Image (tube, rainbow, N blue to C red):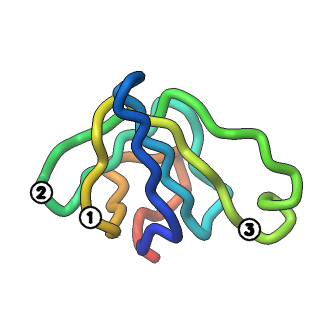
Amino acid sequence: MKAIDVFYLEHDDISCITVQRTDIVAGQKMIDENGTIFEVYGLVPNGRGLLNGISSLLVHGKFEGNIVNLVDGPKGVTNEN
């Protein structure tokens, strides 16, 4: 899926990735365009975003590119969008 926005906080080594999806949960893994695997350790609370089907995910490290591919997900959720 395409990232709407990616913001990297260098001093904390954290990336915030905003995607058009609300079924992602902490603990899921994702991969960037360079093949680096990241684990979602939290979501940024944003009530207005959830109403619009948008989630902001927090991962440790620098997420590069603008394509997000989920490696695993909750049972019954497909990783294709």
- N-terminal label among 2 and 3: 2
Please identify the residue farthest to the front as the structure is shown: 11
- N-terminal label among 1 and 2: 2
| Percent x, y of residue 72 | 37, 46
Q: Which mark is residue 75?
A: none
Q: Which mark is residue 34?
A: 2
Give yes or no for contact between labels 3 and 1 (Cβ–Cβ under 8 Å): no
Q: Residue 53 carries which label?
A: 3
Q: Which mark is residue 65?
A: 1
The one nearer the camera, 70 or 20, is 20
Reply above or below: 59 against 17. above
User: Three-letter amino acid code at disc 3?
Assistant: Gly
- N-terminal label among 3 and 1: 3
User: Three-letter amino acid code at disc 2?
Assistant: Asn
Q: Distance between the residues labelled 1 and 2?
A: 8 Å
Q: Which residue is drawn at 36% across and 55% down?
A: 70
Q: Distance between the residues labelled 2 and 3?
A: 26 Å
67 on left or right of 22: left
